[in-house]
Image (cartoon, rainbow, N blue to C red):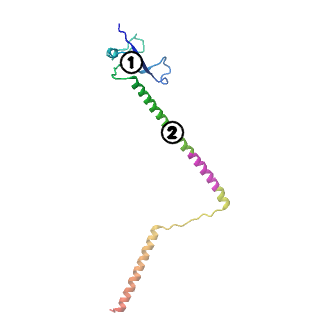
Amino acid sequence: MLELQLCAAYSIQENEDKNKRERGPKYTEGWVEFKFKRDAKLIAKQLNNQQVGGRRRTPWYDDIWNIKYLSKFRWAHLHERFQYENEVRKKRLRQEVLQAKREANLYIENVEKGRKLRKLEKKMKTSSEDLNIREWHYDQQDPHEAAKRRKTKKKEQQQQSTGLTENLLKQIFPS
């Protein structure tokens, strides 16, 4: 029988919130470090795409191993990746919290503005009744009527100016 020497094993547990009914932990992926490269390659070759097996009634009977040999892979790479993913998740969470704070502050500001406006309106109603403030009304001209008046005024001026010259010319040159 083969004797394998493992150095380290790491597995990622599935989110517990999804299946609270299920008993025992479930894992989505895992890594195994062997002492010798030869052993790692042999295990990857033998177990890849093989049925996990066991008795027929076990939940893993139909599952298939998916094992790859990762050349030049170090545990430091794995830890760096997890650190990076955690930082990204924390950054995204911070951004979401900041966005929620901004929305809440905007809502509060709008509520305060509404209160101030209501108070101001109430104050204006009471003060306008007490002070008897005069309201100004301005009559606006109809733009069409104003244009017609200008045209008629222009025509009258032209007729008067041409009439003068005609009278003057008739006096100078009698026909």
Looking at the rendered structure, the secondary structure element under dot 2 is helix
| Residue 122, disc | none
Q: At label 1, which amino acid type do we have?
A: Glu
Whether residue 169 is situated above or below residue 151 in the rendered picture: below
Closer to the camera, 154 or 2? 2
Left or right: residue 103 compared with residue 75: right
Determine which residue is flagged by label 2. 98
Residue at far right of view: 130
Determine which residue is flagged by label 1. 33
Q: Residues within 10 Å of mark 1 (few under 14, many from 20)?
A: some
Looking at the rendered structure, the secondary structure element under dot 1 is strand
Closer to the camera, 147 or 80? 80
The span picked out in magenta is 109-124
Q: At label 2, which amino acid type do we have?
A: Leu
Closer to the camera, 138 or 100? 100
Q: Is residue 122 magenta?
A: yes
